[in-house]
């Protein structure tokens, strides 16, 4: 599964523009008074200004080359961005995914993850930079009933669950791209904040073309 475009809300339009466009040096692909889009490798990360947002936040993950995790970590630190840490640890290895990840916040306090999947053959030789952000590979979808929503999504788009799906947490898709369906009462790792539901639109490639509206229209998912 490939996440082609992820549209999120923001209450910090100018700060988001400076963070992703200047600090992370991502190419701006669309800009108007209320919407801003950045190229993240093969994906587009878009933000729509929303006056209704208060403390809502999202979780997204971006895949980086399997051999560039240490460089990616230093690249983030060099830009003055603080890594999210647990006691004496700011990089995390997930054995069941064979992946290593780090986390940080953007100006909206979205939980942003850089993840190196060691099962992917995507090693590179050039130094780490904005071009090393290969694609958006995860978008979090907090819900009331993980099992029911997972069933609806997998049946609608002919997706599989992978990477340790359970009653409270279910990755749907594959290593290239996943919906992280999570119970609203299960804290996110590693900062232990409870997930929040807010407007999320995702355009992606899947085995079949379909569209789905969930959570009273707050989630709009469309495949092509």
Image (cartoon, rainbow, N blue to C red):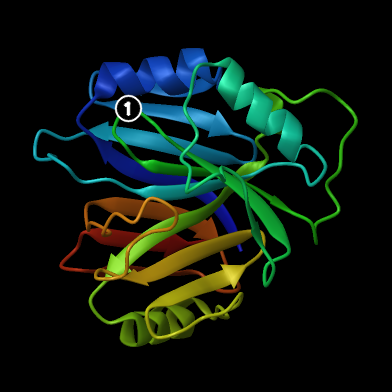
Q: Is residue 158 above or below residue 82?
A: below
Q: Quadrant of residue 111?
A: top left
x then y, percent, for residue 187 = 32, 63
Q: How many marks?
A: 1
Q: On the picture, is 20 further left or further right than 97?
A: left
The answer to whether residue 32 shows anywhere in this view is: no
Q: On the picture, is 161 further left or further right than 107?
A: right
The answer to whether residue 156 shows anywhere in this view is: yes
Q: Nearer the viewer, residue 30 or 40?
A: 40
Q: Quadrant of residue 7?
A: top left
x then y, percent, for residue 184 = 25, 68
Q: Is residue 64 above or below residue 130?
A: below
Kind of element beneath mark 1 = loop
Q: Which residue is pictured at 27% across the width and 34% down the height?
A: 48
Q: Which residue is pictured at 79% across the width and 47% down the height?
A: 66
Q: Which residue is pictured at 37% across the width and 79% down the height?
A: 168
Q: Is residue 62 above or below residue 128?
A: below
Q: Is residue 109 above or below residue 213?
A: above
x then y, percent, for residue 195 = 28, 59
Residue bearing the label numbered 1: 107
Q: Nearer the viewer, residue 198 or 94?
A: 94
């Amino acid at each position: 599964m490939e996440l082609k475009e992820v549209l999120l809300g923001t209450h910090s339009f100018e700060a988001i523009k400076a963070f992703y466009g200047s600090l992370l040096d991502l190419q701006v692909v669309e800009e108007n008074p209320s919407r801003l889009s950045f190229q993240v490798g093969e994906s587009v990360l878009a933000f729509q200004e929303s006056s209704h947002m208060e403390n809502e936040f999202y979780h997204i993950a971006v895949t980086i080359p399997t051999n560039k995790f240490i460089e990616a970590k230093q690249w983030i630190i060099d830009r003055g961005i603080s890594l999210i840490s647990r006691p004496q640890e700011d990089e995390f290895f997930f054995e069941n995914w064979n992946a290593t990840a780090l986390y940080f916040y953007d100006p909206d306090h979205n939980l942003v993850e850089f993840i190196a999947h060691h099962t992917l053959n995507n090693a590179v030789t050039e130094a780490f930079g904005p071009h090393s952000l290969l694609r958006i590979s995860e978008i979090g979808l907090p819900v009331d009933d993980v099992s029911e929503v997972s069933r609806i999504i997998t049946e609608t788009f002919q997706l599989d669950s992978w990477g340790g799906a359970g009653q409270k947490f279910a990755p749907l898709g594959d290593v290239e791209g996943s919906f992280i369906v999570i119970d609203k009462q299960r804290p996110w790792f590693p900062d232990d904040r409870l997930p929040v539901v807010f407007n999320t639109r995702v355009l992606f490639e899947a085995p079949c073309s379909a569209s789905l509206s969930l959570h009273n229209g707050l989630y709009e998912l469309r495949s092509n």
